[in-house]
Image (tube, rainbow, N blue to C red):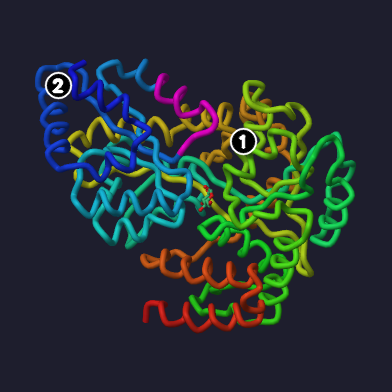
């Protein structure tokens, strides 16, 4: 390994600055990769994704490299916050950087990234290799389809769930009011400091929590006809409950600084009876090397409002940088990760819910994630609420984040937040 490659490995965690680094470095990396390929040596591939707190990515890369010894995959860790990660890719791809070859996209990005020309359409590869798209969860698949083309393949599907401590909670709460009551009673028991943890920081996770509160009261932000309908009595009820929970004394005082990592860290350290999080929380809470609550975690649907429980649909999809200089190898790696073998590993090691439907019947996957079989989880996945699929989704998301944050800070009422969102989102909708 030459000096440049060694230095690249060492600085993997400085993803952001590297993405933004001088073009000369990109050029050198391109030459190196081409050189290696020409001489039949190892081809280096850079794979970027957000911080992975489980060891799933490492294991996935090792399994791939074992199968394809001529491909050397370097993992480029991006910020955990999906919005920051998004901006880092936009900066790099706008500059036509070829540094990153394969990367994971949040379920809400493919339309934007396809429109902007950042990603390569995968249809040609899919056809050539006879990938059976019918095997995939169709909702997840359609999130990476735009203008008739497939721009990514879904790696895992996320749905918001309620995780709780089985040593403290007998029957998980069915409604938001129940949750507040139980969380109040349980706070302080078994060494806990909090009753409930949620994502209330001003970022994409807050949008997911908002979608869930609003939908649990029968409201929507944008309906399936593409109309903005957030200024409705149902949506306002949802917003009111969100503000009530986020300003209650069961959540940390600084809950508006909490994204997923702050929450899951507190939860696995035994500091809370309940947390709203994505499926990976289960694997993490049962990881002996980092969790103090192994074997003490239950999963339930999120609490209901007037309408019933609701989960936001999340998930990640793998795509290829349009400017990659190693498209063949990039596809091989993407196909492995989003294929049966990769998804099975990710379900077992990372606790992620697969997008290849039949993997839910796999005994090893079920053993690692016993709740994947439970009705509550299956229903949450089936009925999960999508965020809008739009090339300008980021702008819509920013409006929601700002207005809901103001409501939590009590600068405006939930009614005002709904009115402002209605007006501002409407002005951003494509005519
Ligand atoms: C998870 C979801 C993703 C969502 C994000 C919000 O990573 O999979 O879709 O946008 O959380 O923080």
- Between 110 and 94, the one nearer to me in the picture: 94
- Distance from disc 1 to disc 2, alpha carbons, whole Å, reads 40 Å
Could you say where residue 311 lies in the image, as x and y percent from the top left? Answer: 65, 56
* Residue at point 65%, 68% (across, down): 408
Tell me the number on the disc at residue 36: 2
Which residue is tagged 1?
360
**Which quadrant is the C terminus positioned in?**
bottom left
* Residue 222 included in the magenta stretch of the image: no
The one of 222 and 183 positioned closer to us in this rendering: 183
Quadrant location, the N terminus: top left
Query: Residue at 47% of width from left, 22% of height from top?
Result: 59
Q: Is residue 167 above or below residue 95?
A: above
Determine which quarter of the picture holds residue 273.
top right
> What is the span of residues highlighted in magenta in the rendered image?
51-63
Q: Magenta stretch containing residue 55, yes or no? A: yes
Q: Residue at x 24, y 26 (%)?
A: 44
Contact flag, marks 1 and 2 (Cβ < 8 Å):
no
Q: Is ligand 1 less than 8 Å from the beta carbon at label 2? A: no
Report x, y in % for residue 173.
84, 52
Say which mark, if any, is on residue 71: none
157 or 398, nearer to the observer: 398
Question: Is there any visible trace of residue 113 in the rendered image?
Answer: yes
Q: Tell me residue 422's x, y (percent).
A: 54, 81
Q: Secondary structure at mark 2?
A: helix
- 163 sits to left or right of 65: right
Nearer the observer: mark 1 or 2; the answer is 2
Q: Main secondary structure of the magenta part?
A: helix
**Ligand 1 is within 8 Å of the C-beta of the residue at disc 1:** no
């Amino acid at each position: 390994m030459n000096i440049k490659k060694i230095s690249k490995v060492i600085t993997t965690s400085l993803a952001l600055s590297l993405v933004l680094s001088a073009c000369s470095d990109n050029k050198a990396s391109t030459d190196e990769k081409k050189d290696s390929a020409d001489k039949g040596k190892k081809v280096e591939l850079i794979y970027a994704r957000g911080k992975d707190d489980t060891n799933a990515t490492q294991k996935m890369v090792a399994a791939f490299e074992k199968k394809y010894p001529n491909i050397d995959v370097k993992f480029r860790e991006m910020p955990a916050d999906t919005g920051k990660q998004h901006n880092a890719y936009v900066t790099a791809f706008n500059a036509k950087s070829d540094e990153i070859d394969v990367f994971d996209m949040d379920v809400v990005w493919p339309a934007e990234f396809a429109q902007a020309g950042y990603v390569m359409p995968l249809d040609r590869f899919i056809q050539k290799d006879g990938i059976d798209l019918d095997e995939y969860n169709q909702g997840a698949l359609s999130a990476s389809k735009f203008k008739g083309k497939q721009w990514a393949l879904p790696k895992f599907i996320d749905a918001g769930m309620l995780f709780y401590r089985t040593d403290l909670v007998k029957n998980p709460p069915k409604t938001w009011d129940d949750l507040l009551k139980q969380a109040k009673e349980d706070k302080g028991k078994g060494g806990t400091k909090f009753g409930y943890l949620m994502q209330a920081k001003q970022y994409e996770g807050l949008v997911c929590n908002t979608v869930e509160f609003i939908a649990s009261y029968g409201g929507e932000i944008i309906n399936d006809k593409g109309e903005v309908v957030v200024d409705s009595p149902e949506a306002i009820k949802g917003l009111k409950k969100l503000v009530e929970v986020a300003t209650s004394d069961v959540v940390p005082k600084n809950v508006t600084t909490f994204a997923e990592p702050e929450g899951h860290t507190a939860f696995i350290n035994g500091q809370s009876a309940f947390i709203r999080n994505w499926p990976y929380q289960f694997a993490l809470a049962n990881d002996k090397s980092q969790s103090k609550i192994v074997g003490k975690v239950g999963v339930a649907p999120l609490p209901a409002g007037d309408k019933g429980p609701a989960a936001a649909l999340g998930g990640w999809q793998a795509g290829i940088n349009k400017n990659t200089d190693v498209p063949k190898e990039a596809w091989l790696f993407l196909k492995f990760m989003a294929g049966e073998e990769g998804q099975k590993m990710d379900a077992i090691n990372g606790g992620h819910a697969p997008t290849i439907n039949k993997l839910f019947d796999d005994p090893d996957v079920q053993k690692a994630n016993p709740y994947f079989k439970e009705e509550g989880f299956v229903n949450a996945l089936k009925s999960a609420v999508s965020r809008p699929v739009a090339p300008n989704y980021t702008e819509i998301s920013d409006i929601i984040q700002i207005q809901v944050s103001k409501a939590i800070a009590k600068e405006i009422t939930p009614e005002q937040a709904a009115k402002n969102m209605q007006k501002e989102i409407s002005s951003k909708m494509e005519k």
